[in-house]
Amino acid sequence: MMPYIFTDDLIEDEWKCHIMAWTNHVEEGAFKQAVNLAKHPCVFHHVALMPDVHQGYGMPIGGVVAFKDAVSPNCVGVDIGCGMGAVQTDIKIEDMTQEKLIDIRERIEDGIPTGFNTHKKRQVWDRFSYFEVIPRWMESREKEGHLMKSLGTLGGGNHFIEIQAGDDGYIWIMLHSGSRQVGKLVADFYNTLAKERNEEWHSELPASDLAFLPIASNDAQWYLRDMDFALEFAEENRRRMLHKVKEIIFMMIPGSVVREINIHHNYVTIENHFGKNVWVHRKGATSAKEGQLGIIPGSMGTPSYIVEGLGNPDSFMSCSHGAGRSMGRMQACRTLEIEDCFKAMEGIEFGGFGFTKVKKQKMFDVGEAPGAYKDIEEVMEFQKALVKPLVKLQPLAVVKG
C-alpha cells in the first residue's frame, strides 16, 4: 500500500516536514508525538510511522526519524538494543511432541532467569573491560556487579522465548530481549544531560522529552560510544540465551542450526537518505534495507514472520518491529476477559504464565495476551511495500519474561 501522508494543512501549528504512515489508523497520543517530531528543529525530510505504531515516551514506538547533525536519546528509548533473535533448525515439525514442548519450556524457565531475576554469579565477557574506568552513567560498583549478572537473562514485560513451527516444515527458536538495565542507565543519564544542555542553549523544542545533543559535541560522542556498548550487550545477551535454548532442544532432539538472525530495533545510526548523511533513530522499528533479513513477531498466541527488506526509501528503509500494542497493559487488564485470553492460547504450551491475579487488585495480569496487540496479518498487509515475507511461524511453546 501507499503510505498515508499528513501535512500541516490539517492543523494550525507549522510543521517542518510531513508525516508518512503505513497504517490507516494512528492513535491520538502517538500522532501528537509524531507531530512534535515534525516540529523538531533538527528533523530531516519527513517522519515515518510503521504499521505497529503506538504511543511511547517522547517518540512513538514504531517510529523512524532522521535528524541533521544531532542525536536525541529519547528517540532511541530506555531499552537500547532491544531486538530479536531467531534460529532455524533442521528439526522437522513432526519430530516435536507436546511432551517434549512441555519439557523444553520447563528447562528454559529453569535455565534462563526471567523478570527481575539474574544469574547468581557475575558472567564472563571480554567487553566488560569497558567497566575498568567506571562510565559516567554507572551509578556504582554495586550496579556494575548487577549488570554483569544480567548478561544472558530475559527480562520482563513483552520479552519472550518461543519455540515455533515454520511453514517451511522446520522448528524455529525466536527470542525478544534487550540490554537489560544497561540501556536504561545510559538513556536516562544522557536524556537528562540533553535536557540540561537544551535549557542552557534556550533551544526551542516542541516537547522537553525530545531534547537533543549536537553531533559535534563531546556529549553526543559519549552517548554514541555508550549506546554502542549497550547494543553490544544486547546482542550478546540474545546470543547467550539462544545458545542455551539450542542446547536444551538439541539434547532432546538431535539437530543443528541452519541459520541464525540477531537484530536490534532501538538504536540510532548514521545513514545516507535522500542524498544526505543523517542520524536515523529507530524506536521500535527494524532496518529493512534491500535483501536484509528481519524478524517481525506477532503476539504470544499469533504468528510471526521472517522477512526480507525491500529497501523502501520513504520508510528510511525500515519496517515494523512487531504487531504493536492495540491497548496499554493496564487497559488490557481492565477490559480483556480471562476466558478469552486462555481461549486465544489454545494449543500453545505456555504454562498459564502471565494470566495471574494482580497483587491487591481484583483483576488478572493479561497485559501480554494476544488481545492486547494489533492483528499481525493486517500489520503485514500494510507493509507489503517495505518487506517480503519469507517464512511464517506459528507458536508452539512460549516463555514470557
Image (spheres, rainbow, N blue to C red):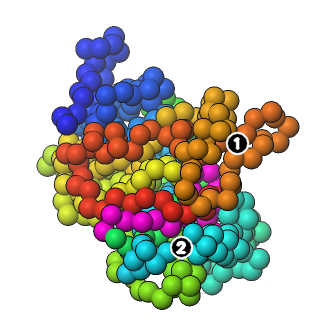
Residue 231's tag is none
Which residue type does callout 1 highlight?
Answer: Asp
Is 321 in front, or is 170? 170
Residue that extends furthest to the right in the rendered view of this protein: 360
Q: Residue 172's spot in the image, x, y percent?
A: 43, 70
Number of marks: 2
Look at 45% across and 23% down and name the residue there: 28
Comparing 265 with 353, the one in front is: 353
Q: Assess whether residue 157 is covered by the magenta stretch.
A: yes
Looking at the rendering, in which quadrant would you find the C terminus? bottom right
Q: Residue 384: percent from the left, percent from the top?
A: 22, 45
Q: Is residue 8 above or below residue 219?
A: above
**Distance between mark 1 and mark 2 Cα atoms:** 29 Å
* Observer able to see residue 335: yes
Residue holding disc 2: 97
Callout 1: few (<14), some (14-19), or many (20+) C-alpha neighbours within 10 Å? many
* Residue stretch in magenta: 151-168
Q: Magenta region's main secondary structure?
A: loop
Q: Give left or right: position of 13 versus 363.
A: left
Q: Residue at x 54, y 56 (%)?
A: 347
The residue that label 1 is drawn on is 365
